[in-house]
Structure formats: C-alpha cells, structure tokens
Image: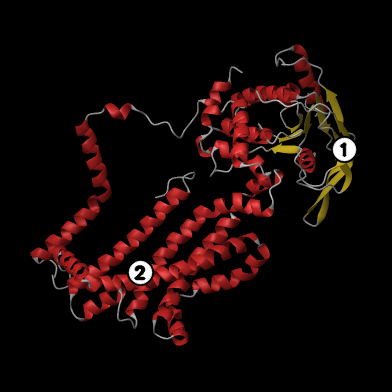
Amino acid sequence: MVSIDFAGRGEVTIRELSKSFALNGRSLTVLKGLNLDIRPGECLVIVGASGSGKTTLLRVLAGLETADGGEVLIDGRPIHGVGTERAVIFQEPRLLPWQTVLGNVAFGLEVRGESKAQAEEKARGYIALVGLADFADAYPRQLSGGMAQRVGIARALTVQPEILLLDEPLGALDAMTKISMQEELARIWSEQGVTMIMVTHDLEEAVYLADRVLILPREKGAAARLVEIDLARPRDRSEARFVRYREELLREFGLH
Amino acid sequence: MSLQHIDRSVVIGPQNGKAGERREWLPRTLSRAGGFLSRYGLLLAFLVLWQVSSRAGWLNPAVFPPLDAILGALWRGIVGGALLDDIAISLQRSGIAFAAAVAVAIPLGLFMGQVRAVESALDPILQLFRQTSALALYPVFILLLGLGEASKVFVIFWATLFPLLLNTIGGVKEVDAKLIEMARVYGASRLTVFRRVVLPGAVPSIFVGLRLSATTALLLLIASEMIGANKGVGFQVMNAQYNFQIPLMFAAIVLLAFMGLFANYALVFLQRRLCRWSEPVN
C-alpha cells in the first residue's frame, strides 16, 4: 500500500481572483472577485453552468493560466505557474502513445529528474493501486477508456502531489465505468490524504465525492455558493439524504 | 467495487485466440497458399503472360524479350561486373544526396515546426521551390556545378529535400498540444518537452517524408543519369537502348525497380522498429 501523510499541507487560499479572456477584440470576464479557502486534505467539487468559469478556475490553480487580479496561495505562498506540489488529471487521459503504461506513469517523476529505475519502481506501486498491475507493459492503444483514465490518475499520484486537480476526469466515460471510477477516486482520496479539487457537471458525482460543493454563479461577481455535504463515507447513492443533497444542487441551478 | 471488472476485461491488443493451433496442416497450407495467391496472383499472371507472349511471338521479342533473356542479361551483367560498377555509382549518387537531405531537412524541419515565426516566414518560398520541378532546374544546376557528379548529386538532394522537410514540419506541428500541456504540468522544460513529446510524436510523419524522398531520389537519379552520364543504372537503360541490347535495357530497369523496393522495405522495417506503439505500417 502506498500512502503518505500530508496532514496540514495542501491548503489553498483564493483571494479576489479575476480572469478575463480577449474574444474577438472584446474582453470576456470569466471569473470576478472569487474568494475561497480550501482546507488541507479536503475534497472540493466545483460545479456550475457552462461558461461559469469552473475549468478556468482549475487551470488557474494548476498554473496553466495566470490570473488578471487577486492571488492564489498554497500553504500560504503565492503560486507562479505550475508547481511540483500540484498534479492535474484532465478529461482525456493524455497518455504518450509511444510509451507503455509503466513509461507513462513514470513520466512525471522522470521529468522531475528521478532516475528511470527509481521512477519505474514507484510507478509500479501506483499502477497496482489503480488495479492495472497486469497491464504495465501494454500500450495506450490497447486500453479501454476507463483503463486509460486510471493510467492518467496513477501518473498524477506517482509524483505525490499535495493537491490533485481534476478537470471533469470521468466526463468521457460510459455510465457503468463512471460509477466504478467514482468509487475508485473516493478510495484513492481517502487512502492518499491528498487535497482534491475537481470540476464536474455531474451533480450526483459531486454529492458522492465532495466534502463541499462550490457552485459558481452565472452572473459574474455574484457570490459563489458552498454546500457542505454532511454524509458518512462510503456514501450510499440511494439513501434519502443523498438524494436530498442532489435535489438541493439541482435547485441551485433552477432545474428542480 | 463490484463493477471494476467491466472496464478491466476489455483488452483489444495482445489476446490472440489459440483455437488455430489445433487445425489440420492441410487446410492451413491451403489457406496460406490462398493468401499468397490473392496477394501475388496477379503479378505472377502478368509475368507468365509476358513470358508466353514473347516466346509465342504474340509480342515482338525484339522489343519485349522473354523474361529468361532479361534475367540472363541481368545475371551476366552482375557476374561479369559490368552492371556492378553502374550499381555502385548510382547508389553513391543517390546515397550521398539522400543522406545530405536527411541531415539538412530533419533538423531544419524540427526547428521550423517549433518556431512559428520562422515557419511562416519560410513557408511561401518553400512552397514555391517545392512546386518548381527539380528536373526543370537541372540545367541551372549543370550551369552552376558542371556536368559532373556535383550537379547530379545536387539535383537529387534538391528534390528529396522538400518532401522530407515539409513532412517533418508537419509532424512537429501536428503533435497534440494537449500532450505538450500535460508535460508542462509536470514541470518539463522546453528541451524535455521537445525530447520526450515533440520528437517521438513527429517520427511517423518523418517516416512518411523519408519514404516519399526515397522514391523521389530514385526518380531523379535515373533522369540525371540519362542526361550526360557515362555510368550508372539510369545511363545503362539509355545506353542499352541506343545499342539495341534490349534484354540488358530491361535488366537495368528491373534493377531500378528492385532498388526502389529495397529502399522502401528498409524504411518500413526501420519504421516498425521505431514505431512499435503506433498502428501497423503497410
């Protein structure tokens, strides 16, 4: 079992965060004056209508976009670009097709300067963690969508981040695979003690995984809503309170 | 957890059925023979038709000599050494030109594909040069470099440069930007991104360029040897025709065909070794 104690680390503070893009010569505001404190080890799920800026927020946290105003602090220090304490899991697995599962999972550590042998040894542990030990030598084209996404997850975990950023990681999977992967993510999160920040458009997924759900408003500058999901884990999707939380989120979108 | 097996059992690649092992040898041999026939049957029929037509006098054997006469001329040319000199000089010309094109086009293409400003500044002139037939420029090269080896090597080099350069640039530009972003998230430097993501991603496209260039090299080799050469396989085709040694002419043509087939086969072999991860090459 691979498990590291991250207690007290992976705290994210967002202060007056603003971001706009130039679109056809006009400025399009995506995020405006957002404030948020994310607790160390928490699972925060971000939902919102399309255009609410949830993916932009995640990309700013990842360091792939720079904010126009405000700041993001991790463990009290402002971020500049990408950082080794963060790892990102994208909607697509983004595997290198010319590398095996092992090569792909070891990639992050190798890029960060670990020797190939060391990186692969650690990678094997995380490949086993996501249940792919038998497929270490397979190439990405030989994997199903769910398996490929597990490889992406293992690659992110292998660099032992304090903060795991997930951008609709299960959005492209079929319904059955999605449910089993949600269970897997819940298990990995509780075992690894990592801060998990995840964007999704699936409200059931949000209730299943989140400690808190952040609902980004459609009107820029309006206050974002936070819903605390007070349910014991592992969660039961058919339980009455689970269903009520889901309905509460639906109401926030004006859909119920 | 109970649903985990669903997406784990779907493996497409390495599973090959073992049912075939128990089949009888006869049907297996027959099915192999059938496979061979469906692939090479038409070629065999063509060769047989040639041989029979020429021997029976349906075709003028002075223009289309029978295959045994052509193979005989080829054998005598190789054993007697007359064709060996031609092969050597032809391989030397195309080899030097091809190697020079590889040495120039691949590094240049990798650089141009990475730097958008350089690529967009050079693209119009590249398109112009590419569309200008190298053969039309051959007289210019002869003026500049004389009728010797230099102009021949240069015209082949010129013609092979562009397919290789454009395919290398294309390969670099088509590398998935999402993979590059993924590498950046892990803190990869520009050099690491290039080495680990861009270069391997461009390899299949570079091979397309190599195979196109090899074909072009042979084409230009023959053309340049037909104009003002006194050695070489291309020269031999022309010379044998002037001297009405028609079997020898066809022997030289067959030789050129085999050189082309061999070059392509060598590149396909190399591509399979380097790109085992990708779809099968044909």
Horizontally, residue A143 falls left or right of residue A16, namely left
In the picture of the structure, the residue carrying the numbered disc 2 is B91
Q: Position of residue B148 (x, y in %)?
A: 39, 83
- Chain to which mark 2 belongs: B
Horizontally, residue B259 falls left or right of residue A144, namely left
Q: Tell me if residue A3 comes above or below residue A116 in the rendering.
A: above
Mark 2 residue element: helix
The answer to whether any part of residue A172 appears in the image is no
Q: Position of residue B12 (x, y in %)?
A: 47, 33
Question: Of the residues shown, which amino acid type is indicated by label 1?
Answer: Ile
In the picture of the structure, the residue carrying the numbered disc 1 is A14
Of marks 1 and 2, the one in the foreground: 2
**Callout 1 touching callout 2 (CB < 8 Å):** no
Check chain identity for marks 1 and 2: say if they share one: no
Taking the spot 65% from the left edge, 51% from the top edge, the residue there is B192
Q: Tell me if residue B174 comes above or below residue A90 in the rendering.
A: below
Considering every residue shown, the one lying at the far left of the view is: B56
Quadrant occupied by the N terminus of chain B: top right
Identify which residue, A119 or B190, lies in the foreground.
A119
The answer to whether any part of residue A138 appears in the image is yes
